[in-house]
């Protein structure tokens, strides 16, 4: 069984199981740069927030999978990833870490730890469970 | 389908009187009911809130009730409590979404909440007067029964009371700018306007979808019958199904972006049961709001004011257990993924907000590719444009989306929008709100204090039992 690196809310259950290299997107310039590179389909996108606007062009142009560090299926990004049928794991936490996202009480270290652990890793998203989405190592 | 094959649809059980519905979340609500059993989400939560009301305002109310100009203090408090729960019900999970990375939404939201509470009452009163009183406002609500592509919809109408009154008053209480018994007359003005629009739209005695087990079946049957002949059959996995669902997603995304990442760009109604037992959702996607200056990129891309999608969902195919069209016009189901259960669809175009219904036209699904291209072009341009804006512009633009757009459709239909701009300085920023701009980023006010008060329900303080209903605010001490 492949190693589960992270878990979070599964936005919608699907047999789609996209794989790719995790790309951490920090700023709108990162998003635009990725789209212009033509390599959007090679990456699972990792973002901090669960809002829609930040990832808007990436979703519109065919993002294959998304991991967020906050938010829930009821968040705008959750709603839109369902509509696009883009597998999405929200409020992901590392399975080998005790750190968890708490609204209004989460320090930078939490986000940095996740970004450091996942950015650049080759992963696959497992979104078959009703509630839990999994980020699985695909090295 | 992946995990629902073989399961029978049970969603109709949700409409039995004794049914409490499913739980969509594990959290519970307390609000002003400290020491009592915590309130759940969904149908059970609605029942609990109604049971705790002191007045009959949360039950079906009559036209005469709605036309009466003043709520009692008990009615005001019941509405305050119910709206606070309803806000929690629809937004508590959304509120976990954290930073945008693009638009400072929490900051613009709190400024808009407070601005609305201060400024809307006299504009809504003027509008009520201009249309001849309460019946005129109910008639504005009723127009939505025979239209698509109209912003007189659940989310806008709900926002009048839930946001302008509920969250606005909550924010000002948290800022200690007002006390619980300030602005009672103004609160009444806002809530009466909301009640009248919603009652006129629903015409079943309720005002909110949550009171009716999350149904928003407002359209007249003969009006629905004019739309359904345009439905085209869609087979899951087929190119046509993909073209329809991709367009739905892309247009919905742009509608969010044009409205600064808020739900005002989206309007679902339904579910309407079709003769063959399938469910119809009508979805308005407002991809080009002409009053926003940044929407010029949508205009340049040749986009209309609104695309309306008719989505037909097969409840048996997905083993549907519950469907909610909530009060911010968004559809959620259990199981969550309804996209693969879409069996038919149609797309309609309303070019301008006031295009007559007779001139709304359908677009064949085979012709959607060209429209999708326009949507994608506008999305990328609007994103690039937005990414270059400074924080202050983003905050005030977002503030306008809430403060103007939430009442814009009602003012347009009343013919009072121009008067509100000219005589009431609608697009000006009140000096009090301008000053709050500097306060909201201190001590985590916008990002922690207000969200916790709003989404926990702890900030919706009741009016005193013996408060004077005529009371405004007279002392700044």
Image (tube, coloured by chain):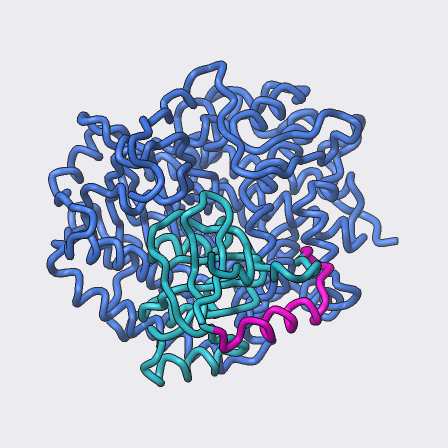
Chain colours: A cyan, B blue
| Closer to us: B221 or B412 | B221
Residue in the image at 30% along x and 59% along y: B305
Q: Name the residue rendered at 60%, 46% in the picture.
A: B92
The residue closer to the viewer here, B393 or B368, is B368
Residue B310 rendering spot, x and y as whole percentages:
24, 44
Residue A138 position (above or below residue B280): below
Specify the quadrant that holds the N terminus of chain B.
top left
Q: Can residue B161 be spotted in the picture?
A: yes
Q: Is residue B425 above or below residue B127?
A: below
Residue range in magenta is A102-121
- The residue furthest right is B477
Horizontal relation, residue A40 to residue B127: left or right: left
Left or right side of B205 for B229: left
Residue A135 in the image: state x and y as whole percent. 49, 61
Q: Nearer the viewer, residue B211 or A42?
A: A42
* Residue B140 spot, x, y in % from top left: 38, 39
| Residue A118 located within the stretch drawn in magenta | yes
Q: Quadrant of residue B253?
A: bottom left
- Magenta-drawn stretch contains B428: no
Residue drawn at (70%, 52%) of the image:
B171
Whether residue B132 is visible = no
In the rendering, at what x and y percent does residue B258 appear?
Answer: 41, 65
- The residue drawn where x is 13% and y is 45% is B232
């Amino acid at each position: 069984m492949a190693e589960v690196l992270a878990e979070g809310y599964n936005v919608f259950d699907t047999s789609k199981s996209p794989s790719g290299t995790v790309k951490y997107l920090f700023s709108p310039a990162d998003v635009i740069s990725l789209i212009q590179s033509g390599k959007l389909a090679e990456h699972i996108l990792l973002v901090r927030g669960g809002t829609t606007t930040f990832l808007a062009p990436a979703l519109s142009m065919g993002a294959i999978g998304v991991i967020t560090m906050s938010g829930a299926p009821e968040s705008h990004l959750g709603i839109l990833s369902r509509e696009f049928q883009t597998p999405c794991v929200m409020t992901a936490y590392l399975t080998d870490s005790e750190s968890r996202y708490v609204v209004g009480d989460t320090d930078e270290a939490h986000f940095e730890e996740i970004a450091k652990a996942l950015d650049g890793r080759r992963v696959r998203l497992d979104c078959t469970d009703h509630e839990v989405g999994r980020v699985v190592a695909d090295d | 389908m992946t995990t629902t094959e073989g399961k029978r649809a049970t969603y109709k059980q949700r409409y039995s009187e004794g049914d409490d519905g499913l739980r969509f979340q594990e959290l519970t609500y307390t609000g002003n009911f400290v020491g009592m059993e915590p309130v759940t989400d969904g149908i059970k939560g609605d029942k609990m809130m109604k049971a705790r009301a002191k007045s009959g305002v949360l039950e079906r109310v009559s036209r005469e009730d709605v036309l009466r100009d003043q709520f009692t203090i008990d009615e005001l408090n019941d509405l305050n409590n119910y709206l606070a729960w309803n806000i929690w019900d629809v937004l508590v999970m959304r509120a976990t979404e954290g930073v945008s990375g693009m638009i400072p939404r929490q900051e613009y939201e709190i400024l808009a909440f407070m601005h609305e509470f201060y400024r809307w009452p006299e504009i809504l009163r003027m509008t009520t007067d201009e249309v001849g009183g309460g019946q005129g406002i109910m008639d504005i609500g009723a127009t939505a029964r025979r239209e698509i592509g109209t912003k007189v919809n659940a989310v806008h109408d709900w926002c009048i009371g839930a946001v302008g009154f509920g969250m606005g008053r909550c924010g000002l209480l948290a800022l200690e700018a007002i006390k619980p018994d300030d602005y009672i007359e103004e609160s009444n003005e806002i809530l009466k306007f909301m009640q009248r629009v919603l009652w006129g739209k629903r015409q079943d005695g309720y005002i909110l979808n949550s009171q009716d087990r999350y149904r928003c079946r407002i359209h007249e049957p003969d009006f629905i019958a004019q739309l359904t002949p345009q439905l085209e059959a869609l087979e899951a996995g087929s190119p046509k199904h993909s073209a329809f669902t991709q367009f739905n997603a892309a247009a919905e995304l742009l509608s969010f972006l044009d409205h600064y990442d808020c739900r005002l760009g989206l309007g679902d109604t339904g579910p309407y049961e079709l003769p063959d037992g399938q469910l119809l959702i009508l979805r308005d996607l407002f991809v080009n709001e002409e009053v926003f200056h940044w929407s010029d990129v949508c205009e340049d891309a040749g986009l209309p004011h609104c695309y309306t999608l008719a989505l037909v969902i097969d409840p048996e195919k997905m083993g549907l257990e519950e469907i909610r069209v909530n009060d911010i016009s968004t559809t959620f189901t259990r199981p969550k993924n309804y996209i693969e259960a879409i069996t038919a669809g149609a797309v309609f175009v309303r070019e301008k907000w006031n295009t007559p219904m007779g001139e709304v036209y359908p677009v064949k699904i085979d012709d959607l590719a060209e429209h999708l291209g326009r949507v994608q072009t506008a999305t990328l341009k609007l994103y690039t444009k937005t990414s270059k804006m400074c924080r202050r512009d983003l905050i005030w633009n977002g503030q306008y989306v809430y403060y103007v757009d939430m009442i814009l459709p009602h003012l347009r239909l009343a013919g009072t929008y121009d008067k509100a701009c000219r005589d009431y300085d609608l697009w000006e920023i009140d000096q009090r709100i301008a000053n709050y701009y500097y306060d909201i980023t201190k001590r985590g006010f916008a990002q922690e204090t207000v969200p916790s008060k709003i989404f926990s329900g702890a900030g919706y303080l009741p009016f005193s039992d013996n408060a004077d209903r005529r009371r405004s605010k007279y002392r700044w001490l």
